[in-house]
Image (spheres, grey):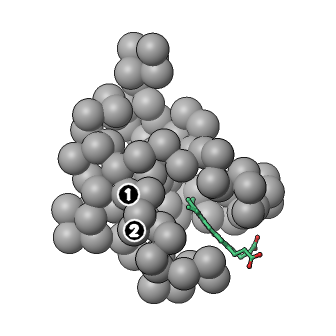
């Protein structure tokens, strides 16, 4: 079952130790298990921990990346009210 997060929940997960959440579009990904294997590097991912990284994501990747990694990394979606 998919969990729903507020932007506050996501913001509190901004380090690998606490869980490194990022938002891409309406979805929340937990990146801590992936930072060390990210082809774009760990540093860039750590910088966007806890934040909406949609703009950066779409600059460097396409839909196929999400298709490949969603099952492993996606932990839920943003709550409707959190998007306002
Ligand atoms: C769900 C989150 C993400 C996943 C699964 C992911 C995965 C990947 C993968 C597989 C690549 C290799 C290139 C490709 O296959 O397209 C890549 C490259 C890259 N990623 Fe990510 N990434 C994520 C988020 C991000 C974010 C948020 C940023 C920036 C803040 C970022 C920056 C980069 C950069 C700079 C590259 C290298 C592009 C290049 O060499 O041309 N990634 N990423």
Q: Position of residue 38 (x, y in %)?
A: 56, 79
Q: Residue at x 63, y 82 (%)?
A: 39
Q: Secondary structure at mark 1?
A: loop
Residue 75 visible in this rendered orientation of the protein: no
Q: For this rendering, which residue is in front, 79 or 84?
A: 84
Q: Residue at x 46, y 35 (%)?
A: 77
Local crowd at mark 1 within 10 Å, few (<14), some, or many (≥20)? many
Q: Are the residues tagged 2 and 1 within 8 Å (C-beta)?
A: yes
Quadrant for residue 24, please give it: top right
Q: Which residue lies under the disc numbered 1?
A: 49
> Within the displayed image, which quadrant is ligand 1 positioned in?
bottom right
Above or below, 21 against 80 in this view is below
Q: Residue at x 72, y 51 (%)?
A: 58
Residue 16 visible in this rendered orientation of the protein: yes
Q: Position of residue 63 (x, y in %)?
A: 78, 53
Q: Position of residue 27 (x, y in %)?
A: 52, 40
Local crowd at mark 2 within 10 Å, few (<14), some, or many (≥20)? some
Above or below, 51 against 40 in this view is above
- Where does the N terminus fall, quadrant-wise? top left
Q: Is residue 51 left or right of residue 39?
A: left
How far apart are labels 2 and 1 at the CA level?
Answer: 5 Å
Q: Which residue lies under the disc numbered 2?
A: 46
């Amino acid at each position: 079952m998919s969990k729903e997060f507020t932007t506050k929940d996501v913001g509190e997960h901004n380090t690998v130790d606490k869980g490194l959440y990022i938002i891409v579009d309406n979805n929340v990904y937990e990146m801590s298990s992936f930072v060390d294997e990210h082809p774009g590097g760990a540093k860039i991912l750590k910088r966007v921990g806890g934040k909406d990284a949609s703009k950066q994501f779409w600059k460097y990747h396409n839909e196929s990346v999400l298709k490949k990694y969603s099952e492993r990394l996606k932990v839920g979606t943003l709550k409707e009210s959190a998007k306002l």
